[in-house]
Amino acid sequence: MRILVEGESVTVAEPDDLGRLHLELTGTSAEAASAALARAGLGRIDDTGHARIDADALRSLAEPVGASEDWRRRWTGMLDYARSKGWLDDSGQIRVHLA
């Protein structure tokens, strides 16, 4: 899954690819992208250069209409993996790298 920030627009590409997650910036600075993420209710870019993305907000944006039980299982698996690596905190924020 890719979170795309282009100018002030935030979208999700490849929501069915739950084996990867990163943030891509196009034509925008990290500061402007952080503001766009905040306006979208998804999160922000922190001082370490990683995005902090709200898992529930991302799911709302990414989950396909009529998502299958398989998609939900793989989503949970992605979060479990992120938690095991220390990338998902107790507040539900996922640490996402910028590509």
Image (cartoon, rainbow, N blue to C red):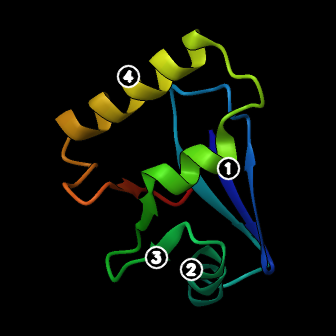
Q: Amino acid at mark 1?
A: Leu
Pick the front one: 41 or 33: 41
- Which quadrant, please, contains the N terminus? top right
Residue drawn where x is 56% and y is 81% of the image? 34
Q: Is residue 57 above or below residue 31?
A: above
Q: Is residue 28 left or right of residue 56?
A: right
User: Residue 45: which disc?
Assistant: 3
Residue drawn where x is 52% and y is 34% of the image? 20
User: Residue 38: which disc?
Assistant: 2
Q: Secondary structure at mark 1?
A: helix
Q: Residues within 10 Å of mark 2 (few under 14, many from 20)?
A: some
N-terminal-most mark, 4 or 3: 3
Q: Residues within 10 Å of mark 4 (few under 14, many from 20)?
A: some
3D distance between C-alphas at marks 4 and 2: 26 Å
3D distance between C-alphas at marks 2 and 1: 14 Å
Q: Residues within 10 Å of mark 1 (few under 14, many from 20)?
A: some
- Which quadrant, please, contains the C terminus? bottom right
- Name the residue furthest front: 66
Q: Is residue 58 above or below residue 53?
A: above
Q: Secondary structure at mark 3?
A: strand
User: Residue 61: which disc?
Assistant: 1
N-terminal-most mark, 4 or 2: 2
Q: Amino acid at mark 3?
A: Ile
User: Residue 77: which disc?
Assistant: 4
